[in-house]
């Protein structure tokens, strides 16, 4: 009963309304070879079409144990050595998993002047202002992850029942919103997503506030979210309820101890605050040995439906995070 109410409240107040299903979709093989291929997804709406790339890396032999669908806001993944620990394609495939990297910049540019130029303008007339409550970049990225999932359901190399949507930081905000709305993701990973991600909104003075995120990134969220600048207490929802919307899918919250801007303690409290909803499914065990802050760093805590870790060091999606994701059997209870 609460699920549709909460989804509406998040659309109306935080992330904005979600784009409708495309009126048409095509998939085109855009090159690459068997274990590192590119697919171009083209979506059509009433005002036009937009295309974006999904790059898929699979183990050289055997069916992947699962797929990490990365909402890649850096657009430089896998075969680019500069991506480092952010998206270590060979480490992921070497562990027996697939990586599918969605080029988020193509879905919606991360820029206040041009963010509509990807998928949004396929649905809204380019010459008119967007409605105040229409989703912006983060909403478009989450929608793009669902379109990538539509494709993965058609790919014979992938088991679509084992796809984890993952994002780091701004990509983590989008991953949570994608996983809250789309029950096809059995695992949803928030890596250092912070404000308007896993962090509790009511800790507005800890880390990045709502007014700070709205003024620095005016194209991420709808105008309606700006009502809560310096007014977080008026929100009808808080972010633990976003995590709870992922239930009974596995929610994974990862923080970094020195990532003050993301408020790791606020992410931890939000994780704890989602557990009562998981408990309705008999999945309320958070895996943590204690609810006091801070938990031990570098250790993966795992319950049957919820996972958490606190990495030492600062903001980033790093090898140490992947070691925990790849080593903790996320697709089983
Ligand atoms: C900025 C922003 C954060 C965001 C981060 C990132 O620091 O303030 O909200 O998560 O960028 O995406 O790395």
Image (cartoon, rainbow, N blue to C red):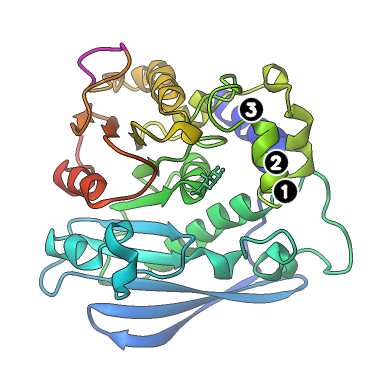
Q: State the residue in front, 315 or 225.
A: 315
Tell me the magenta residue range.
288-292
Q: Which is in the foreground here, disc 3 or disc 2?
A: 2
Q: Whole-Å distance between the Cαs marked 2 and 1?
A: 5 Å
From the viewer's perspective, is 131 left or right of 97?
right
Up-down: is 151 above or below 179?
below
Up-down: is 325 above or below 78?
above
The quarter of the rendered structure image containing the N terminus is top right
The quarter of the rendered structure image containing the C terminus is top left
Residue on which the image places disc 1:
218
Which residue of the protein is positioned furthest toward the right in this rendering? 128
User: Tag 1, which secondary structure?
Assistant: loop
Q: Position of residue 145 (x, y in %)?
A: 48, 58
Q: State the residue in front, 44 or 291.
A: 291
Up-down: is 289 above or below 261?
above
Residue 236 occupies which quadrant of the picture? Answer: top right
Does residue 240 belong to the magenta stretch? no
Answer few, some or many: residues within 10 Å of disc 3's Cα (few below 14, many 20 plus, some between 14 and 19).
few
User: Tag 3, which secondary structure?
Assistant: helix
Labels 2 and 1 touching (C-beta < 8 A):
yes
Answer few, some or many: residues within 10 Å of disc 2's Cα (few below 14, many 20 plus, some between 14 and 19).
some
Residue 167's label in the rendered image is none
Q: Whole-Å distance between the Cαs marked 1 and 3?
A: 26 Å
In the rendered structure, which disc, 3 or 2, sits on the residue that comes first in sequence?
3
Seen at 49% across and 60% down, the residue is 73
Q: Position of residue 129 (x, y in %)?
A: 87, 58
Image mark count: 3
Look at the image and tell me whether residue 221 can be seen: no
Residue on which the image places disc 2:
214
Q: State the residue in front, 204 or 4.
A: 204
Residue on which the image places disc 3:
5
């Amino acid at each position: 009963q609460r699920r549709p109410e909460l989804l509406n409240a998040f659309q109306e107040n935080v992330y904005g309304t979600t784009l409708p299903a495309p009126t048409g979709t095509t998939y085109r093989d855009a090159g690459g070879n068997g274990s590192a291929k590119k697919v171009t997804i083209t979506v059509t709406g009433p005002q036009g079409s937009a295309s974006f790339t999904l790059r898929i890396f699979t183990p050289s032999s055997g069916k992947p144990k699962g797929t990490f669908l990365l909402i890649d806001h850096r657009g430089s993944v896998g075969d680019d050595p500069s991506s480092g620990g952010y998206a270590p394609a060979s480490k992921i495939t070497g562990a027996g998993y697939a990586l599918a990297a969605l080029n988020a910049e193509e879905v919606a540019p991360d820029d206040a002047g041009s963010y509509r130029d990807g998928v949004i303008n396929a649905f809204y007339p380019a010459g008119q202002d967007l409605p105040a409550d229409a989703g912006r970049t983060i909403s478009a990225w989450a929608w793009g992850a669902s379109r990538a999932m539509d494709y993965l359901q058609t790919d014979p190399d992938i088991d679509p029942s084992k796809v984890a949507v993952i994002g780091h930081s701004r990509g983590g905000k989008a991953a949570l919103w994608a996983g809250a709305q789309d029950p096809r993701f059995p695992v949803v990973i928030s890596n250092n997503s912070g404000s308007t991600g896993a962090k509790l909104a009511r800790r507005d003075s800890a880390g990045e506030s709502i007014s700070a995120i709205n003024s620095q990134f005016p194209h991420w969220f709808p105008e309606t979210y700006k009502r809560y600048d310096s007014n977080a207490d008026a929100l009808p929802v808080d972010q633990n309820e976003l995590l709870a919307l992922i239930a009974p899918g596995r929610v994974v919250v990862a923080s970094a101890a020195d990532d003050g801007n993301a408020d790791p303690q606020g992410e931890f409290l939000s994780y704890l605050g989602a557990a009562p909803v998981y408990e309705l499914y008999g999945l309320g065990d958070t895996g943590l040995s204690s609810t006091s802050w801070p938990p031990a760093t570098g250790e993966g805590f795992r319950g049957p439906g919820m996972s958490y870790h606190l990495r030492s060091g600062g903001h980033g999606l790093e090898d140490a995070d992947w070691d925990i994701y790849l080593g903790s059997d996320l697709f089983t209870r």
